[in-house]
Image: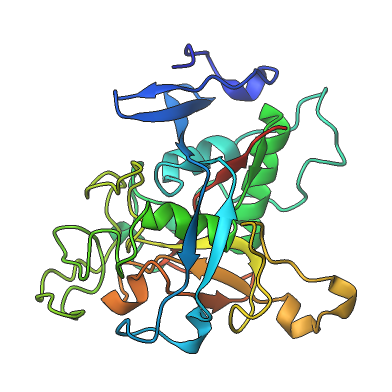
Amino acid sequence: MASPRATQSQQPAEAWRILRWRSRHWAHREPLAQGVALTMLRIPAGSFEMGAPETEAGSSYRERPVHRVRLGEFLLGQTPITQAQWRAVAAWVRLEHEDAKRWPEEALDADPVAKLDYAERFLGEQRPVVNVSWMQAKAFCGRLALRTDKNYTLPSEAQWEYACRAGTTTPFHYGDTISTKLANYHGRQVYGDGEKGDYRQQTTDVFSFPANAWGLHDMHGNVWEWCADQWHDNYEGAPEDGRAWIDDEANQNKNDMNRRLLRGGSWNCHPRNCRSAYRYISPPDYLNDPVGFRVCCLPQD
């Protein structure tokens, strides 16, 4: 584990240190501020079948054709970005040695959750930050990348689904159905042979539920998570190497350019919308109480 420092925001970038995290997963710990760090888990290289077959309940044409994607190794946040992590990075100011042209122009509100109606249902240092747009999430990643000299970004849609599945092919990484003992969603609704459970009507702390096989928490429910890709109605022509699907802007309709991907479902979603393959669409300036994000880091070489 990287040795603690007073504050990453006042120090030059350092090399990666990938160490065994809690004796099970390989991870990098990125200090953000005093007492606040970001845990990035190593996701192994491999391939998987992306999307959902017609036989999967609740699936749609938007999740097809099912296609094989091959991905290199990358790092992904163990949880969605928490309010403590967001607040730490939002407080950063550009240092003298950092390139002004690379410092994101998008401002980061120190406490976007507090701006919500019924904010008390969502506030908490270890709860996911919500009420964050795609543009703000991208700016957060930009600050991280500049400060650490690492390739922080939003995950591609393929990276997100690959990491969520963690080698599984079922609708959820937990199996064929889901319960509110395993995730935070609209528990009065059921999927498959599942049973009704709690409808909490709020977010929950990020380590409240079991992780998947690769150590990732909250891949189903709690908050929607932004991906880097532009929206496409289905997977016809999708990349097969795991990169974000970004079209040539010169050949892209403006309305299509403004549509972005969300994955994972949220605290107020029907469980079918929390499936590993489910895709959701929203404009990049959209922000509300179900929407957060987690970060990805690509190999430096």
**Quarter holding the N terminus?**
top left
Residue 127 x %, y % = 34, 49
Query: Relative to residue 253, is residue 244 drawn left or right?
Result: left
What's the residue at 49%, 88% (across, down)?
61
Residue 115 visible somewhere in the drawing: no
Is 105 situated above or below 238? above
Q: Is residue 250 visible?
A: yes
Camera-nearest residue between 37 and 25: 25
Q: Quadrant of residue 272?
A: bottom left
**Rendered residue at 29%/60% (across/down):** 121
User: Does 280 sit above or below residue 25?
Assistant: below
Q: Residue 133 location, x and y as percent? A: 58, 63
Image coordinates for residue 238, horizontal then vertical, percent: 65, 72
* Count of marks, rendered view: 0
Residue 15 vertical position relative to residue 269 in the rendered view, above or below: above
For the C terminus, which image quadrant?
top right
Colouring: rainbow
Q: List x then y, in percent, for residue 93.
A: 70, 33
- Please identify the residue farthest to the right as the structure is shown: 250
Residue visible at 66% across and 57% down in the picture = 243
For the point 56% across and 61% down, the residue is: 69
